[in-house]
Amino acid sequence: MHVRTYLKKKYYHHYRMERNYDDILPVVNLNVPPQRNSHDSEVHVLENMYRYLCRGDEPWEWHVPPNTWCTTDEAGSVRERISLEIRALARAGGYGRHIPEIKAPRATQGPTCSSFFRNL
């Protein structure tokens, strides 16, 4: 389900009236590099959404893509970094024992994805 559809349904359920999100949630089509395997979809979505939303430009411009996108070559190291960040957040929230340790194969040489939680 698209985010826009979800928001419309939630808004209608709560307020019993229609809401058009076109003005505050524009559809953006970006030229993202293709994923070259069948098992890294979530990694690509999470990292590329982070890179798109957290570019650091002010004011944030929805139509400006990031300088780099996450590639298939980076997926292994990104997967490992994301799992470590989730574990750190779980530990900080008292849920560390509920999250199993995830090991990912090391990625081949390539640029490194930026760290979401630099101080963890």
Image: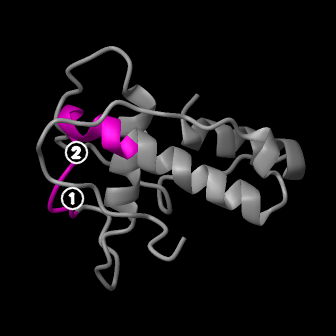
Q: How far across and how far down the image is residue 97, in percent? A: 80, 45
**Amino acid carrying mark 1 in the image:** Pro
Q: Gap in Å between the C-alphas at discs 2 and 1?
A: 7 Å
Residue 108 numbered mark, or none: none
Query: Which residue is labeled 1 in the image?
Result: 65
Q: Earlier in the sequence, mark 2 or mark 1?
A: 2
Residues in magenta, as a range: 64-78
- In which quadrant of the rendered view does residue 36 lie? top left
- Pick out the residue farthest to the top: 38
Q: How far across and how far down the image is residue 118, in percent? A: 44, 73
- In screen coordinates, is 71 left or right of 12? left
**Amino acid carrying mark 2 in the image:** Leu
Q: Is residue 20 visible?
A: no
Please report contact status of discs 2 and 1: CB closer than 8 Å, yes or no.
yes
Density class for disc 1 (Cα within 10 Å; few <14, some 14-19, many ≥20) is some
Q: Which quarter of the figure is the N terminus placed in?
A: top right
Query: Which residue is labeled 2 in the image?
Result: 30
Which residue is painted at 61% across and 51% down in the image? 86
* Label 2 secondary element: loop
